[in-house]
Amino acid sequence: MAKSLLCFSLIAAFALILNVCIASSDQEIGIYHLQRGKFSVKITNYGATVLSLLVPDRNGKLDDIVLGYGSIDDYKNDTTYFGALIGRVANRIGGAKFTLNGRVYKLPANDHGNTLHGGSKGFSDVIWTVKEHVKRSHLTLTYLSHDGEQGFPGKLAVTVTYMFIGKHKLAIKMEATPLTKPTPVNLASHTYWNLGGHNSGDIFSHTIQLLASKITPVNDKLIPTGKLSPVEGTPYDFLHPRTIGSKFNELPDGYDINYVLDRPSGPIHHFTKAAVVQHEKSGRKMELWTNQIGVQFYTSNMLNDTVGKGGFVYKKHAAIALETQGFPDSVNHPNFPSQIVDVGDKYVHAMVYRFTAS
């Protein structure tokens, strides 16, 4: 009897140790490499973050065109969201609260009384589980967000896949499934781009075209007013390509605004071109396609002598972010397309970057 109890105790202890080891391994932070020809990208499962992307210029010279830090520890203390996957709800939620099915949900107020990028510990600050990694093809990461995490209702199963398509395209596919309650979902990729190279200075000479005739204007706290305003004749008009710096002096501090994409009528899963960015000196060109209805154009206005890769210091306006998304603060604007996803439904957000050089 004593021997049986001893065996049982040893088995139980071993099982406990095994479970601890499994749990620990699930929490390990790694760096994962994808490569297709000359193109290569590095991603960490901390925040499902894009660390780097090497792309050739017109002469075949490779440069890393993604801003970032020199170590994973720096990402843990990051306030810029370099390369991160943002959720449960990207962008801002006014007043750090919303009402769903008659109940008021209060969220962390981490941005001047509002909620920014999922709260004080959003998806950019958690460790994702590696589901599958094929170096020449793709990386799939998963995360299970618990009921009440950062104030949001219900469990949410989230998956992101980074993948190469052909020789010149990088795709990101984000999916989320509510498991227990309806919940708002608006995921986004917050990569900072400089096509001249992450350490090449400001982005004023980059040319950009945004396929969007309207914006969602904001108040002094960057919360949408609920209106849609045409861009024609304003500094926000990029319907035709022009340099980012060409009308900068007409803005208080740069661009940080959601553009309403000119989508053809039809299901939201259809792709449309959102933006084209070009850098004349290197010859690099980046096209962005998405199935989403909006894109946040941000000119890194909050960078402030941030020490990045190789000790390079990123100054204000050192990069652009193009965050495809639903409209900001949609949970508080009934006239905006809803971001509420019901149990049994699935949120799918896809984006494709096409890189060329000439």
Image (cartoon, rainbow, N blue to C red):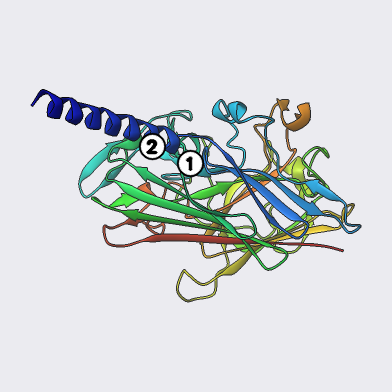
Position of residue 292 relative to residue 66, above or below, is below
Neighbour tally class for label 1: few under 14, some 14-19, many 20 plus, Cα within 10 Å: some
Q: Position of residue 274 (x, y in %)?
A: 62, 62
Neighbour tally class for label 2: few under 14, some 14-19, many 20 plus, Cα within 10 Å: few
Residue indicated by mark 1: 223
Q: For marks 2 and 1, give the CA distance.
A: 42 Å
Q: Position of residue 124 (x, y in %)?
A: 50, 38
In the picture, measured across the screen, residue 244 lies left or right of residue 269, that is right
Q: Amino acid at mark 2?
A: Ile
Residue shown at the point (27%, 41%) measured from the top left = 147
Position of residue 250 relative to residue 8, above or below, is below
Residue indicated by mark 2: 22
In the picture, measured across the screen, residue 237 lies left or right of residue 174, that is right
In the picture, measured across the screen, residue 109 lies left or right of residue 304, that is left
Q: Is residue 309 visible?
A: yes
Res. 146 image quadrant: top left
Q: Position of residue 57 (x, y in %)?
A: 85, 55
Q: Amino acid at mark 1?
A: Ile
- Please name whichever residue, 190 or 293, is drawn nearer the observer in this view of the structure: 190
- Please name whichever residue, 58 or 276, is drawn nearer the observer in this view of the structure: 58
Name the element at disc 1: loop
Residue shown at the point (38%, 30%) measured from the top left = 108
Name the element at disc 2: helix
**Do callouts 2 and 1 mark residues in contact (Cβ within 8 Å)?**
no
Screen quadrant of the N terminus: top left
